[in-house]
Image (cartoon, grey):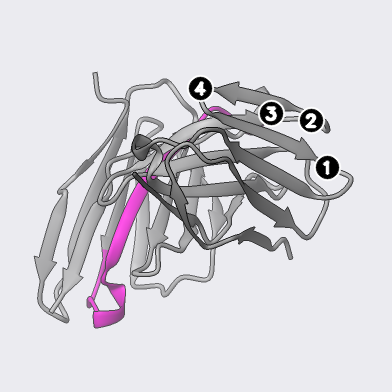
Amino acid sequence: ELKVEQNPLFLSMQEGKNYTIYCNYSTTSDRLYWYRQDPGKSLESLFVLLSNGAVKQEGRLMASLDTKARLSTLHITAAVHDLSATYFCAVDNQGGKLIFGQGTELSVKP
Amino acid sequence: DTAVSQTPKYLVTQMGNDKSIKCEQNLGHDTMYWYKQDSKKFLKIMFSYNNKELIINETVPNRFSPKSPDKAHLNLHINSLELGDSAVYFCASSRTRLAGGNEQFFGPGTRLTVL
């Protein structure tokens, strides 16, 4: 059974700093998704990673996928307060299901 | 303009009641989903329909019954509501997986509170 684990689960950062969120998963998959959720809101799709070595960047966020290591990273560069949210990775279990990680609650402080 | 919409946004009800949540998508997608997000923000899939056919049916009490009248709509009916059903329920949709991906687009959520 596919399991997806994120770490850290909570992250308090200072503005301007860099940090990485990790997403590990337990069985083979080459499709991974990152979502953002603001408090009380829906999930917004950030990145779609569909092959080994895929790298996507949008603003201060960059996501990558290593299917051999079963690892995806979400790197935050020069954090700003607007990035405060909960970030989820989700892995396609090859059967049409997305299995979500626990979420990483990011708080960016001045 | 709304891509995936749900009604109602909030639902407060007593234990034992029956309630429904409706979902509609205007993205032209073939597949729709129901997820439950608990108080710790953990998201778990409940059901999925592809072109009105049930394709994923997770271990969910049979008090929960999804219905898809057409591929743009997916409703969730819950009988005999229990305290543990309190959660946020999200509807989502995607293209058929074989079409190249399973990126799912989520509705705004329905916050269900059972008293």
Q: CA distance from mark 4 to mark 2?
A: 21 Å
Q: CA distance from mark 4 to mark 1?
A: 24 Å
Q: Check if mark 2's residue and mark 1's residue have beta carbons within 8 Å.
A: yes
Q: Check if mark 4's residue and mark 1's residue have beta carbons within 8 Å.
A: no
Chain hosting mark 2: A
Crowding near the residue tagged with mark 1, few <14, some 14–19, many ≥20 C-alpha atoms within 10 Å: many
Q: CA distance from mark 4 to mark 3?
A: 30 Å
Crowding near the residue tagged with mark 4, few <14, some 14–19, many ≥20 C-alpha atoms within 10 Å: few
Question: Which residue is label 4 attached to?
Answer: A59
Q: Check if mark 1's residue and mark 3's residue have beta carbons within 8 Å.
A: no
The answer to whether tags 4 and 1 share a subunit is yes
Q: Position of residue A18 (x, y in %)?
A: 57, 40
Q: CA distance from mark 2 to mark 1?
A: 7 Å
Chain hosting mark 4: A
Which span is picked out in magenta? B78-97
Q: Quadrant of residue A57?
A: top right
In the image, taking residue B77 as reference, residue A72 lies left or right, namely right
Describe the element under mark 1 as helix, strand or loop.
loop
Please tell me which of labels 2 and 1 falls first in the chain. Answer: 2
Q: Quadrant of residue A5?
A: bottom right
Amino acid type assigned to the residue bearing label 1 in the image: Thr
**Residue ID at (25%, 25%):** B2
Q: Position of residue B102 (x, y in %)?
A: 60, 34
- Labelled disc at residue A51: 2
**Residue ID at (50%, 36%):** B104
Please, is residue A31 above or below residue A91 in the view? above
Chain hosting mark 3: B
Q: Check if mark 4's residue and mark 2's residue have beta carbons within 8 Å.
A: no
Amino acid type assigned to the residue bearing label 3 in the image: Leu
Question: Which residue is label 3 attached to?
Answer: B98
Question: Which residue is label 1 attached to?
Answer: A67
Amino acid type assigned to the residue bearing label 2 in the image: Ser
